[in-house]
Structure formats: C-alpha cells, structure tokens
Image (tube, rainbow, N blue to C red):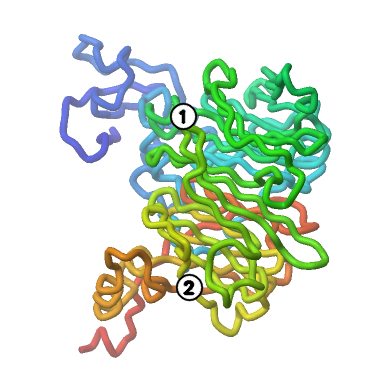
Amino acid sequence: MEAAGAGGRRGTVKQLNVGGKLFALEASSLPISLSLSPSPNPIFVDRDPALLSAILSAIRAPSAAPAFPAGVLLDEAHSYGLHDQLLAALSPPPLLGFSASRASTLSPPSEPFPTALAPRHDGSLCLAHGAGLLTHYSPALEHLTTFRTHLHRITSLRQLPPGLAVAGSSLSPGLHVYDLLKGRHVASVQWSDPTDLRVQKAKVIAIAARPAADAADKNSPILATFECPHRENCILVFDPVTLKPIQEIGRQTGSAAKSSAPGRVVHLQELGLVFAASVSSGAFGYSGYMRLWDIRSGDVVWETSEPGGVGRSSRFGDPFADVDVDVKQQILYKVCSKSGDIGAADLRCLGKDPWVYMSSGPRGSGGGHGSVLHCYKSQVFVSRKDGLEVWSRLEEQSNGTANLAEQTRAKENINNEGINENCFRSCYVDTEEDADRGMIHIMEGGGDRLFVTREEMQGVEVWETSQLAGAISLSLSSLLV
C-alpha cells in the first residue's frame, strides 16, 4: 500500500482502492465526494493505479523523470486533489537569471515564426505565430490547441482567465477575445467616438492585462493602446468581465514623436498609475517618451522625452531603445541606444533627473541598438548583439552566492534618496552558441520560465534555472580536512 500526505501535514487518512491497489491519502487533499465518505472500508475508485503511483512518485522525487507524460499525470491528479502539488513538483526551480540556461525549444505545428507571446503565472504559454495562428501550451509545456484566427498577424497578446486570450493586430482594427480551449472567437471591442470622425478603424498597439494569480487579480482591468489611421490614439480601460470601455486616458493626435501611440503600457495597480512609453528609430537614431498617468483622474503626473527633455546633459545624444517597469520593486529601467548602459529610476522619487546609470563592461560595449529589455521577478533581462544579459540587485542576486561584504555594502548603498549603482550586478547568461542564433526579438516571463524568440528564427526558446543551480562543489581536499 502506498501513502502520501498533503503538504507534509498530518491529518485524517483515507484508504483508496484504486483499480485493486490500496493507497492511503490525507482526506484534506481529496475531493469532497471521497473525503466525506462514511465507509470504514477502502473507497473503491475505478481508475488506473499506475497513474496514481506515478503521481505520488513525481511529488516525492521532483527531479526524476515522470513515468507518464506530464499532461496525463496533471489531468489525473485532479481526481485526487493533487494537481497543485504535482504541478509544483514538475515546475522548474525559481528563475535565477544569472544561472538560467536554454532548457528546450517549443515549435508550433505550422508557420513557426512567433509574432507575440503571452505566458501565465503557472508557466503556461499562449503563442501567436504565422498568419494569425494561436497555439496554447499547458503549464507542463505540452501542446493543447492550435487554431487560426480571423486576424492576418497578431502583434499584441495577453491571457485572461479562464482559458481566454485577448489579441490585437497592427494590421486589423479592434481588440479581440478568443477561447483557447475551444479555438474560437468570442468577442471584439472597437474604439469609437461619434463626436470625432477621425476615431475609426483603430488598431491595437499594446495590451496590459494581469493573468489572475489570485482572486484579487480577476478584477484587474484590461488596458489597450488604440491608434487610428490618422494616428489619433489613446489608452482605453476595459472591464475584464463585460469588456465594455470604462475610461479613456491620454488621447493624442499622434502628429509628432512625443504624441505617437504607446508601444508599451503597464498598469501599476498598487500605485493607481498607468505607465506608457513610445519609442521609434530611424536614420537619425532613437526618440521617444515615457509618461505616468493617474488612472483615477487621467492626469499626467510625470513625463520625459528623449532626446531632450529632462535629464543629464551628458546623455542628450543617448536616448533609450527600450524601457520596462519592475512592478514589485517599483523601479523603472531603460537601456540606452548608443552606450548600451542601463538606467534605473525609483518610481517613488521621480524628478528632473531620476536616472542612475550602470555600464555592462567590455562585452556590452556594442551599444543598445535593437536591444529588448524585460523586467521579471525583480530581475532585468536585456538582449544585446552579443548575448543575453541579466541585471539584479545584490540582495536579490545573492541567494547565498554573494559574500557577506558585498551584501553589507549593498545595504549601505540603499538610502532614502533612491537607487545607487553599486546595488546592482550583471552577467551574461548565454553561451556563444546561443548568441550566434541571432538577436533576441521578444522576451516574456511566466512562472519560473523566460520565453525568448529571436529574429528570423523558428520556435520559442524556454529558459529555466537548472535543478543543480546553487549546488556547492566539494573538492576531495576539502572532504579530507
């Protein structure tokens, strides 16, 4: 007879007769129909005992390869209330950028050139590729569905619960919702204004939606940037249930670079703010702007533009190539287009010159042209021509790897005035073989994975931290001491 507990807690044990084999499981982990059975005899369950045995083995020894496909075990685990425990056992270790590596590559069944990525907190992935195709992968990265949408090319994508995706295209108007499980179109939303004839056929440039990790996230609104053919643009806020527009923020004419449609929008729900940024490049380099809106009033509370605007005069000719927000630590990061330096600004004390700049060293001396920056799990991932770089604050990076002097120095450098460059460390995490495959085009984090696509390359790379990360190597001499 096999036995298993729920999360290491002691409680009432129920015996199950699964296909003629006895198992003992804690009643607290079982579905109500099994846990409340008054029978003193083992409860008969007409299911495959080999699957339950494999589930228990996977929970006990997460590093061992499961005897059955992960998707089969996860589906079976629902019958015994063990799905969450099994998913945790099959998931990779916490994502530590400085020890991450390419674990696998996902290849969609057809037209495998990705155009947008939308991972969730559980490590699942929705992938847009080819001519309007959507492919859905489970938390175990097993292929679930692939279907063609009515859009020619999907350029912005986010997942919504339960099993829904919201998508936009730079070639077709409207914001569209799809059922990933049934592979069908559910609804569409348009930006319209009867008082302004210029507002019509608006295309979606960027989407901000928080995939629900808990009950509180289910009420988080959906934000989308719309742009009309005449370049009139705004950020619309939608109710996540009814999909009706509830607010319009920052309408602009789009006649200049400082009023073009934001290509990145982030909802800072805890601060009651909306961050938006637009960046463009041409023969004369990069230009763009960043803004913070108060979502309640719709007023701009801070903004800057580059080149020009506020900031150090020495950085006038070094505008940003990309920007993102670390929502948890409330820090704004940008990568400079010419020098490749990383700029950091504390959202809680923005002013005329909020930036602290950090240099990458010799390997990052190629500049930041074409770089993509992504904040995830208090880490900053930056794609460069010569590889993938990760930045982290010393207290985040250490996890036992930094010495006591470095940790003490980092704490001393954090003061009430904001950020100090000595608080950060960087390293390149890819090999020469990885860098030779091409420059990274899209980066998105989900669960404990980083999903990466490269220019003119098929498929999606999945980066994870190895199970051996953080292991201490012991030499023979140290063992003999």
Element on which disc 1 rests: loop
* Residue pictured at 45% horizontal, 42% vertical: 268
Above or below, 235 against 343 in this view is above
Percent from the top left, x then y, of residue 160? 55, 29
Q: How far separated are the C-alphas under marks 2 and 1?
A: 33 Å
Secondary structure of residue under mark 2: strand
Closer to the eye: label 2 or 1: 1
Residue at the disc numbered 2 = 426
Q: Is there any visible trace of residue 184 in the rendered image?
A: no
Look at mark 1 in the image and give the residue it sits on. Answer: 220
Q: Is residue 205 left or right of residue 76?
A: right
Q: Nearer the viewer, residue 332 or 88?
A: 332
Residue type, mark 2 in image: Ser
Quarter of the figure with the C terminus: bottom left
Q: Give the amino acid type for the residue marked by disc 1 in the picture.
A: Ser
Residue at (26% x, 70% y) in the render = 411
220 relative to 16 in the view: left or right: right
Which corner quadrant holds the N terminus? top left
Indicate whether 478 appears above or below 448.
Answer: below
Image height of 360 relative to 61, above or below: below
Residue 104, quarter of picture: bottom right
Q: Nearer the viewer, residue 111 or 479?
A: 111
Q: Residue at x 19, y 13 (%)?
A: 40
Judge by depth and name the residue closer to the eye, 25 or 232.
232
Mark 1: give few (<14), some (14-19) or many (20+) Cα within 10 Å. some
- The local crowd at label 2, few if under 14, some if 14 to 19, many if 20 or more residues have their Cα within 10 Å, is many
Q: Is residue 169 visible?
A: yes
User: Which percent across, then down, holds residue 267?
Assistant: 49, 39
Q: Count all numbered tags in the image, as a single digit.
A: 2
Q: Position of residue 72 (x, y in %)?
A: 53, 33
Q: Is residue 47 left or right of residue 12?
A: right
Residue 96 image position (x, y, % from top left): 44, 61
